[in-house]
């Protein structure tokens, strides 16, 4: 079992430690749900000033994102592609760093306490798998440092995904 260490360093040090923990935790484990569950837990421990962290997985049959493993309050179960921050990140397959979600056109308020958000698409072999979504009760919580490290963590996750999903 991997020992999860409490994060007490700088932002970059905490992310570096979280990345190492994620890589060690999911290495060689083929179960996607188990891996995403542990990653959401690790990120919940690593990040300060957040109120939700988790995954939405793409469901081809409905062209929607469906709630996956997460840490936080209950959340929206389904999000259509192109709707809100998560649906937009998935549809455009690019990271969205939103300083004030209330200014984002079509924002879907799953938790009224959320004020900023970062959403990273998860894609493997040009196939949309889902998104990593992190919310904060503060505006402007996320920056380019968060984006850089979360993209590294996302890439580590993608590396362990099976080549064919769904």
Image (cartoon, rainbow, N blue to C red):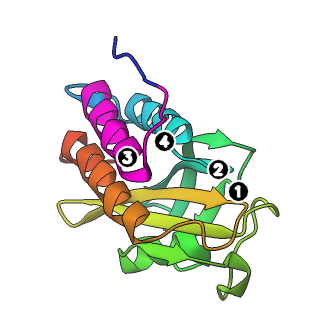
Vertical comparison of 164 with 17: above or below:
below
Disc 2 or 1, which lies upstream in sequence? 2
Asked which quadrant contains residue 39, the reply is top left
For marks 4 and 1 on the same chain, the one whose residue lies earlier in the sequence? 4
As drawn, is 18 to the left or to the right of 132? left
Lower sequence index among marks 3 and 2: 3
- Residues rendered magenta in the picture: 6-25
112 within the magenta span: no
Residue 56 in sight? yes
- Residue 45 lies in what quarter of the image? top right
Left of 114 or right of it: where is 19? left
Name the residue at 46% across, 60% down. Answer: 61
- Which label is found at residue 52? 2
Classify the position of the N terminus by image quarter. Answer: top left
Marks 2 and 1, how far apart in space?
12 Å
| Element assignment for label 2 | strand
Disc on the earlier residue, 4 or 3: 3
- Along the viewing direction, whichever of 108 and 163 lies nearer the viewer: 108
Q: Where's residue 14, x and y in %?
A: 40, 42
Q: Could you say which disc has been placed on residue 76 in the image?
A: 1
Element assignment for label 1? loop
Circle count? 4
Whole-percent x and y of residue 44? 56, 40
Q: Residues within 10 Å of mark 3 (few under 14, many from 20)?
A: many
User: Which tag, 3 or 1, sits closer to the chain's start?
Assistant: 3
The Cα–Cα distance between marks 3 and 1, rounded to whole angstroms, is 27 Å
Q: Residue at x 36, y 76 (%)?
A: 94
Q: Residue at label 3?
A: 15
| Residue at numbered disc 4 | 43
């Amino acid at each position: 079992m991997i020992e999860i260490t409490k994060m007490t360093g700088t932002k970059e040090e905490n992310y570096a430690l979280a990345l190492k923990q994620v890589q060690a935790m999911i290495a060689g484990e083929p179960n996607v749900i188990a891996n995403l569950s542990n990653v959401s837990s690790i990120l919940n421990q690593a990040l300060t000033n957040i109120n939700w962290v988790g995954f939405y997985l793409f469901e081809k049959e409905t062209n929607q994102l469906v709630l996956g493993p997460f840490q936080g309050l209950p959340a929206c179960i389904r999000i259509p592609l192109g709707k809100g921050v998560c649906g937009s990140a998935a549809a455009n397959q690019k990271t969205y760093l939103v300083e004030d979600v209330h200014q984002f056109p079509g924002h879907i308020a799953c938790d009224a306490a959320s004020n900023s958000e970062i959403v990273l698409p998860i894609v493997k072999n040009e196939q949309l798998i889902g998104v990593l979504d992190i919310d904060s009760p503060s505006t402007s919580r996320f920056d380019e440092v968060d984006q850089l490290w979360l993209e590294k963590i996302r890439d580590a996750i993608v590396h362990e995904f099976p080549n064919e999903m769904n």
